[in-house]
Amino acid sequence: MPDAATLTRTLLSVRDLHGFYGESHVLHGVNFQVAEGEVVTLIGRNGVGKTTTLRAIMGLLDRQQGSIQVAGTELVGLRPDKIARVGIGYVPDDRGIFASLSVEENLMLPPVVKQGGLTVEEVYGLFPRLKERRKSQGTKLSGGEQQMLSIARILRTGANLLLLDEPTEGLAPVIVQQIGDIIRQLKAKGFTILLVEQNFHFASTLADRHYVMEDGKVVDMIPNDRLEAEAEKLARYLGV
Amino acid sequence: MMELIGIPPQALFGQLLLGLINGAFYALLSLGLAVIFGMLGVINFAHGALYMLGAFVAWLLFQELGVGYWPALILAPLVVAAFGVVLERTMLSRIAKMDPLYGLLLTFGIALVVEGLFRHLYGVSGQPYPVPDALQGGTNLGFMYLPTYRAWVVVASLAVCLGTWYAIERTKLGSYLRAATEKPQLVQAFGVNVPLLVTGTYAAAVALAGFAGVLAAPMYQVNPLMGSNLIIVVFAVVVIGGMGSILGAVITGFGLGLVEGLTKVFYPEAANIVIFVIMAIVLLVKPAGLFGRTT
């Protein structure tokens, strides 16, 4: 059966990825691909290695083995700043808003890594609330606003592959909906998105495919249109 | 002659000026220490030795090459910065992920080596450095006599402190620096070369110490021990102001210099310990320091 990712151009390809924090071996041979323009999720229970996989892609683990390729460039062994310059924007699970920077400084912080990013006006157009509060201290924003700032700031940089780590965690349903709208708009603009998500209902409204992780490995792939047919299997994976 | 609370104004203002001068050095040095601690997590015990190195480089430039004060004011900090780059790249970067105690011990050792070397080469008697022609003499203000060089030291130090504050708080490069102080990994994952930023920060902060050394040279003698005499007080200033606060370091530096000067007028016996008494009180009442953030 042809993988959806092989039908179009593969942007991100992760092969036999092993990751370590100090002595502990946390990723045990992760394999998956993301095609250009796709929205793909990594799902699974807590502690199966979803966040660690994103950190591994950014080169933030103590040690890693295997292969991570983005548009043909091998990332394993590169320094995080070189990895970012391949064209990857990262939204960490803690949102990573800087307390000593204003909202505007937070927004302008990530350097431009490629041509073709959104202009500041376009970013403010997507997130009008951030423009109103641009002089505030970054961490004085509400949780939802911080999450939007965390996404907004990587849209300026020209990165075309976005790694979003649980963008809806701890947010009110109305904010989750807004973030869902933003992600759909980004997909329409052609961004490729790898999304780590616990909120499976949310993920199913925007993703093309879902990779299921267990014990530091990808164990299954479910296309979004097969979700209902595979509901039982999925419930077992997620333990719900 | 008018007297204020039984003190002749000459003595009062004279001591206040001395306090401002001391405060200028406390501010320049504690500013660098605060920046280094924020970015590298290192308590830079070599800071006093690097201040001394700045003074000695100025003296050697003058003695060996006939290079005067004004070029030395630029060149000596650059030499100290270059030395800082070597220290950071060859030693400090290797202990970056270890307990802060290692950084303290390492820089303490570096201070001993650098001071020992200059003691061996030049003895401890101190070398005179002339006041530049343009800054000789002074002005009678009526209530006190103001030596031009001392006024220059206060003004130059204030200007450099404010310039540093501006660079850190109001520029793009400064926003990288503040962000990397908080979350270095994330800043690097945005595409910023953080190791280079760390090296540059250390170099710039020790250049401030070198600059202070050149300012000090014409006023005090150039002496291998001039740094270690000063650095203990400067550490107390940093503790009082709070680690990691830029403006706090500057205000505390000048403020404590003035307090020290006033103590010399009103209760001279306590002048040498007043800063440490204040440190003890601040530690009891507000352990993070006057301007420190408790997070």
Image (spheres, coloured by chain):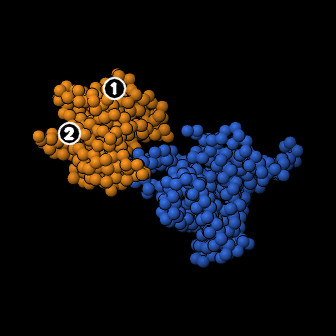
B170 vs B213, left or right, is: left
Kindly identify which chain the residue marked by label 1 belongs to.
A
Looking at the picture, how far across and down is residue B252, in whole percent?
66, 46
Seen in the picture, residue A230 relative to B3 is either above or below; the reply is above
The mark nearer the N terminus, 2 or 1, is: 2
B7 vs B261, left or right, is: right
Task: Give the drawing colour for chain A.
Answer: orange
Kindly identify which chain the residue marked by label 2 belongs to.
A
Seen in the picture, residue A163 relative to B39 is either above or below; the reply is above
Q: Nearer the viewer, residue A94 or B3?
A: A94
- Residue B134 in sight here: no
Instruction: Say which residue label 2 marks.
Output: A37
Looking at the picture, how far across and down is residue A224, in whole percent?
20, 31
Pointer 2 and pointer 1 on the same chain: yes
The image's mark for residue B1 is none
The image's mark for residue A176 is 1
Looking at the picture, how far across and down is residue B110, in whole percent?
60, 65
Quadrant the C terminus of chain B occupies = top right
Amino acid type, label 1: Val
Seen in the picture, residue B114 relative to B18 is either above or below; the reply is below
B293 vs A85, left or right, is: right
Task: Give the drawing colour for chain B.
Answer: blue
Amino acid type, label 2: Gly
| Residue at 30% from the left image edge and 45% from the top image edge | A88
Q: Quadrant of residue A55?
A: top left
| Residue at 20% from the left image edge and 34% from the top image edge | A222
B152 vs A157, left or right, is: right
Q: Nearer the viewer, residue B212 or B105?
A: B105
